[in-house]
Image: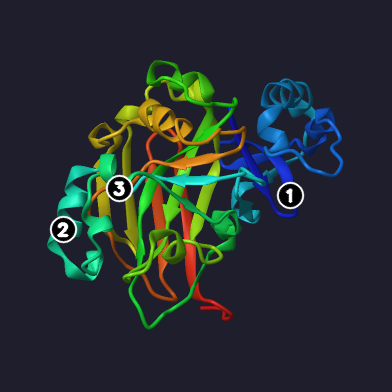
Amino acid sequence: MKLCRFDDGRLGLVEPGQVRDVTAALDVLPAYRYPLPPFDPLIANLDAVIARVRTVASHAPAVPLRSITLLSPVANPGKIVCAPVNYQKHLDEVRDNAALHHHNTATMAPIHTAGLFLKATSSLVGPGQGIALRKVDRRNDHEVELAVVIGRQASDVEAKDGYGHVAGYAIGLDITIRGPEERSLRKSPDSYAVLGPWLVTADEIPNPGALDLRISVNGDLRQSSNTKYLILGVPELIAYASSFYTLNPGDVIITGTPEGVSPIQPGDVITACIEQIGTMEVKVRAAGGVG
């Protein structure tokens, strides 16, 4: 099943060329009061929501996909966990280009040494909201990545059990300001984490380790690879992350980007595609402006 969030936070069932407004299915969600739980309520109750979607979908109004604004399919992730240099060819290009590594040894280390890092949850947007570039006097790069949405709490799990903790998958864009600072700072401005176009439930993608992914800017192909080249695959990343902290429903793991990262500027249009997930178009503007 493909589920999206759109417009003012409505829930949609994605069908070819259209979305059925199944917001009524959210009535199965429990009511929470302060202090709010450390997880995304929709993802934590995804099975119940899906069952209700199946009940209401046939009578739900359909709207053209092109007429809606797509938001992030996860509204409230507790963490956005990122895997740096998780493709060997990307690690090679970073090591070979000072404009990428800025003589920061941490950016040139393999993932087993570099570890993982976190992006601020406030950086999260959907494709319809676009990217608002900051520090436009510096290089801002696109990075296309497979995104994994955690569906069941995971703490110190083994890789062989990793898939059992996945709710689904999406396309992730990890936008990056190049420079000498720590990754989390340079990658956490508002809108620098794009998630979309929708959540594809895990049952639809039994093997996330064999997906073509690519990104174009203004029609020019920039990155093209396959998730089979990940150094640490989805279950290994879940095991690695959960050995340091508890992963909760709605947490997002962005699995790393292949070679071909390159600059973006206000006015650019990014098109990102991942096999079995779909395609999303994202417009780039300057922060505070219309681009």
* Element type at mark 3: helix
Please give the name of the residue rendered at 27% of the width and 36% of the height, measured from the top-left corner: 230
The residue under label 1 is which amino acid type? Gly
Q: Residues within 10 Å of mark 3 (few under 14, many from 20)?
A: some
Residue indicated by mark 3: 114
What is the number of the mark on residue 95? 2
> Mark 2 or mark 3, which is nearer to you?
3
Q: Which callout, 2 or 1, points at the residue further toward the start of the chain?
A: 1
SS of the residue at dot 2?
helix
Out of 187 and 47, give the one closest to the viewer. 187
Report whether 131 appears left or right of 114: right
Q: Which residue is mark 1?
A: 9
Residue 132 vs 81, above or below: the answer is below
Which label sits in the foreground, 3 or 1? Answer: 3
* Type of the residue with mark 3: Ala
Marks 2, 1: nearer the viewer = 2
Quote the CA–CA distance across marks 3 and 1. 36 Å
CA distance for labels 2 and 1? 42 Å
